[in-house]
Each structure stands twice: as C-alpha cells, then as structure tokens.
Amino acid sequence: MTNTKATKSKKKPDAETLQKDPEYRKILELDFSEMIPFVLSNIRKRGVIPLLYMIINAASLLFIIFYTIWSVHSGQLKAGRIFWQIITGIMAGSILVIPPHEILHGLAYRMLGARKIRFGVDLQQFIFYVTADRFPISRRELAFLALTPFIIINMVIIAVTAVWATHITLFSASLLLSHNIMCIGDFAIVSYTFSQKGELYTYDDTDKKKSYFFKREGEG
C-alpha cells in the first residue's frame, strides 16, 4: 500500500501549492527592485559560498598582478600591450559576456524543465536576469541554475587561453576577474539558500517582479 504522505513529500510542489498549502511557509518575498541590498547583505555573510567568491576574485587579481610584473621583467609584454589587454579584458568581462552569461542561465532553466523563460534588465541597478514564471526549484536546482554560467565561462576561457591563446593571458584573466565579480548576485542567492536549514523552494513571479522563498513547515 502506497504511503500518500511520503509520495507527497517527494513530489516537487508547484507555485500554487507553495502559496496555499500550510505545509509550506513563506520565508522571503523579494522584489526585483530590492535585489542590490539583498545581494550585498548575503555576500557579506559568513559561510563557504561568500568565502569561495572572495577567494576566487582575490586569486584572479593576484594572478594579474604577478603575471604583469613577470611580463615586464621578462620582456614578454610591453607596457602599452599590458594596459590594453587589461582594459579590453575588463570591458569584455563587464559587457560582452552578458549575453552568453544570461543565455546559459536560460539553458540551465530549460534543463530543469522550465518553458516560460524570460530575459530582463533593470538598468537602474545594472542587473540582467532570467526568470521562469512560477516555476519552483529546489535549493540544489537553484545552485545549478545560478552557477552554470560562472563554471562554463571560466572553463571555456581558461581552456582556450591555455591551449591556443597564451599570448592574451592578461586579457583572459582580466575578463574572468571582471565577469566573476559580476557573478556576485549568483553567489549571493546561493549563499542565502544554503544559509537556510531544511527543505527549501523558490520561484519567480515575472508579472509581479518578485521572487518567493518557502520552507517546509517544521524544518529549520
């Protein structure tokens, strides 16, 4: 005989269930316009995710500094070329990488089963985002969704530079540093969800421009 309660607990709830079922409790309602305070608050928290974010960016910056010093002393690169590689790398990592970054978020959503995917931008906050309207995801699915662009873009740029383009190492390193810094929102939202105990789900309401976070009642 099937245990109905056990079956229910294993099935991922839909948005309506999360809102109406007393088994789930809303722990956060986040308006898209409040994203910057949310991001800054959660990236400053103590935890593995914020620490990892800081270490990655600090390591990238140190690599650029030491590679620049080595290039000057060894005569590998002239000052002008160093300057332009760093500047163009920063620009590419801040602007040109945005479309592939968001497309990768969209592909990650598709892999999770979402279909109503929308791309958006808030120029006042300089935030670019992808939503799947009223499509709940779990904590682990959110981590996959949030960090997919960071992981893939880093892997591709490092591999291409190491194999075919070592002459633009400073450009690539500057691009990655700039891009990784701009991944602050992705790391912050993962940091928030992993700071919460118990079973957690989240979804976006695209029309209302809000994100909702829920926990199963009695957990955490």
Image: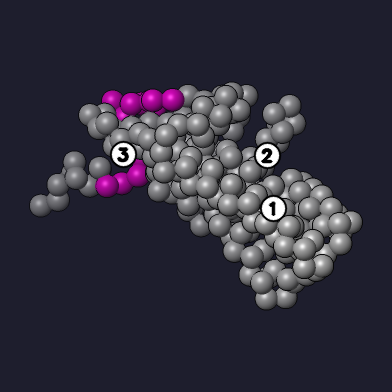
Q: CA distance from mark 1 to mark 3?
A: 43 Å
Name the amino acid, label 2: Phe
- Is residue 16 among the parts visible in the rendering? no
Is any part of residue 90 visible from this angle?
Answer: yes
Please give the label number shown on residue 199. Answer: 3
Q: Residue at x 27, y 31 (%)?
A: 220
* Residue 59 higher or lower than 206, as above or below: below
Question: Which one is closest to the eye, mark 1 or mark 2?
Answer: 1
Q: Which badge, 1 or 2, comes first in the chain's sequence?
A: 1
**What amino acid is found at the position of numbered circle 1 in the picture?**
Ile
* Sequence-earlier tag: 1 or 3: 1
Residue at 74%, 45% in the rendered image: 94
Mark 1 burial class by Cα count in 10 Å: few <14, some 14-19, many 20+: few
Front residue of 1 and 14: 14
Write the start and end of the magenta stretch as one range: 10-28
Q: Nearer the viewer, residue 172 or 65?
A: 65
What is the distance, in whole Å, between disc 3 and disc 2 at their CAs? 28 Å
Quick one: SS at disc 1?
A: helix
Q: Secondary structure at mark 2?
A: strand
**Which scheme is used to colour this image of the protein?**
one colour
Q: Which mark is residue 128?
A: 2
Residue at 55% x, 50% y: name it.
56
Residue at the disc numbered 1: 65
Q: Nearer the viewer, residue 96 or 154?
A: 154
Q: Position of residue 1 (x, y in %)?
A: 10, 52
Q: Quadrant of residue 216?
A: top left
| Residue in view at x 39 percent, y 25 percent | 27
Q: Nearer the viewer, mark 1 or mark 3?
A: 1
Marks 1 and 2, Cα distance to the nearest angstrom? 29 Å
Q: Amino acid at mark 3?
A: Glu
Please say whether residue 25 is one of the residues in the magenta stretch.
Answer: yes
